[in-house]
Structures are given as C-alpha cells and as structure tokens.
Amino acid sequence: MTDEIDLVARERPDVAPYSLAAKAAVRRRLADPAGRRARPRPRPYLFLAGGTALLAAAAGVVAITTVLTEPEARPAKVSPGVVTLPKVSAMSAEEVLGRAARAVTDLSPRDDQFVRVSSQTMYEADVVGEGEKESRYLYRTKRTIWLSADGTRDGALKVEYLEPHAYPGWPIPPEAYKEKGTEWMRLPACNSVRDTAYTNLKKLPADPEKMRGYLYDRPHGDNPPDTGAWTAVGDLLRETYVPAPQRAALFKAAATIPGVTVTENVEDAAGRTGIGVGRISGGVREEIIFDPSTYELLGERGIVVDEKEAKAPAGSLVASTAQLEVTVDDTAPEVKDPDSGCL
C-alpha cells in the first residue's frame, strides 16, 4: 500500500519526515468510515461517520489534506448531485423511531467472534493544491470491516474505491482519481478495547432516559447540545453493532431530540427507498434512513436545504451511505499490513 504521507514527503523533500505517530493518526482516520470528511464550513459538522462515517465520529470531523503538484491533464467532471428536497411527513419521529426500537433484533456474537459490517459510503473531501488553492469533491467507497466482539483481537478493513462524484459547484480535482482498486488494512487491538466493541456497547444504558443523558454528555466540540446529541446517534450506528436493548433505547432517546422530523421516499447510497429521520444543522438536513416495512436501518444521508448557510445548491446530496449487511464471523481475514503496528 502506498502511504499518502510518504507521497507528500517525497514531493516536499525540504520538510522533515512525518513521525510514526503522525502516520498512525492518519491511518486511523482512513480506517474510520467518515474520518476523511472535510472540516465544516460553516456548518458545525458534515453528516456522516464514518463512517463511515455517514456515517470517524461526526463530532470529530477531520480533513485529509493532500498537496497537488503538476496536476494531471484530465478533464474536470461535474455532476449536479441534486435530488428533490425532502418534505416533512405527517409521521412523527417518535412514531418511526418507536417502530424501529420495537423491530430490533440481536446477532448475539460470542466474545471470540467478529462483527462484520458491509457498507457503501460517499463523503466530502478537501484537497489543497498549489498556492493553497482548495478543491472539494465527494469520495465514494465500498467497505467491509471485521470488528472483534470483545475488542481483544485484530480486526480487518477492506476498502474498494469507487468513482468520485463532484461536490456541487466544484470540478473534480485530479487527486480524486489517485485512489483506485481495493485496499486492505489490519486493525490491531493494541492491548486496548475500543469504545465501539460489542462488549463495551453492552454496557451502555438500556433505559431511554439514561441513554438520552449519555448522548448529551458525550463531547460535542463547538456544536450546540442538540446537534451534538444527534451526531452521537449516528456515531453509534455507523460501522458498529449495538446490542438490541441499547439500540432500542437509542432510537427512543433520539426521538426526544428537538428538531427531529420525518421525511418519506428517501434514498440511501444503494438506491433503496426508505423513511428519513433527521434534523437540520448548518443548512444541511442530516438523516438516518429506515426501511419503510421492517424499520431496519438502511443508511444515512446529508442533503442541503439552505443554500446560503450550507454554501451549496439546495437539494445537493453531500453525504450518503448504505448499510448493506451486518453479520457475525468466527474469524477475520489475516492482513499483512506492516504500517498498522501499535505505537
């Protein structure tokens, strides 16, 4: 695998080499389904995780910045990426999320097993070229992640890079086409159990009121409390598997967040139509999508509803994901990835 940080270092030989810790930090962002989302401008965060992340946690949005030199002679591609603006449904968030809570089931993985999540994602990315000129585009992937249920075993991540899409109003920069094919990463346990491990998620409150308190108590940076709480809901659903009691409490708690409404005929990244439950932040409506019949989770999306505030055309789809499959495996693929060691 070609390390993006090494690419930058080779293009800028006068700059001191990046440390192992810095490289590891970038790799952690790449391993997060939404970790490469761009920093917010001006909205508090761009809808997700994620992851991926829409899923890295949405409250911890970061940008991968790449220096462009001698751009390829490739024609710019512009895709409108505009969909019909969502119309608020007569259904209430309490009704939809209540049905979702009643529909939850549990795979009940053993501690020695792995939760496997397959998804498709589209998120915003920033690129900085010569003269600090900025470009934006939507990068797309298919992802499969293997997560140790108890967090003590090395996991794995498979990323298939898809054709990028234009961010509304911006041409696709040449850098967007450099990530191609399929990439594998090892996710080392490193003698520490992640908060998103199934066994840790089982420790979250199963009571809706206590779960609501948990959502509001999580760090939310400069975001208003309600925005931070809604971000936390998406973070807990993106490339994780929350046990049934906690997931039911999560959906019920989410229904109590002010500003949450319902829209119908909403598409996920796989083209499946569902019911969107979301709220507006920074001119973008950030939705979690459910199957209209089973109320199972389908994915997430971010759609511009206020052109002035979001600085993008109304109806622009700026984030979209689809949760394709969640299952349990006895083992994770063994990945030879020398750059993924513990520090």
Image (cartoon, grey):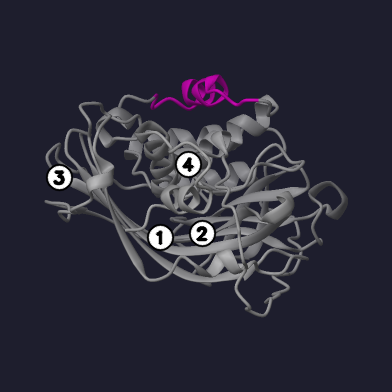
CB within 8 Å, label 1 to label 3: no
Q: Quadrant of the C terminus?
A: top left
Marker disc for residue 56: 4
| Residue linked to disc 3 | 113
Q: Tell me, yes or no, whether the highlighted magenta stretch contains residue 215.
A: yes
Question: How many angstroms separate mark 1 from mark 4 (CA)?
Answer: 14 Å
Q: Which sits earlier in the primary sequence, circle 2 or circle 1?
A: 1
Marks 4 and 3: which is nearer the front? 4
73 in relation to 324, above or below: below
Label 2, secondary structure: give it: strand
Q: Mark yes or no: residue 89 visible.
A: no
Q: Check disc 3: other Cα within 10 Å, few if <14, some if 14-19, many if 20+.
A: many
CB within 8 Å, label 1 to label 4: no
| Residue linked to disc 1 | 119
* In-front residue for pair 50/7: 7
Q: Which sits earlier in the primary sequence, circle 1 or circle 4?
A: 4
| Residue linked to disc 2 | 321
Which three-letter amino acid code belongs to the residue tagged 3? Gln
Q: Which sits earlier in the primary sequence, circle 2 or circle 4?
A: 4
Label 3, secondary structure: give it: loop
* In-front residue for pair 161/340: 340
Question: How many angstroms separate mark 4 from mark 3 (CA)?
Answer: 23 Å
Dividing the picture into quarters, in which one does residue 58 lie? top right
Q: Which sits earlier in the primary sequence, circle 1 or circle 3?
A: 3
Q: Which sits earlier in the primary sequence, circle 3 or circle 2?
A: 3
Dividing the picture into quarters, in which one does residue 106 lie? top left
The magenta-colored residue range is 205-221
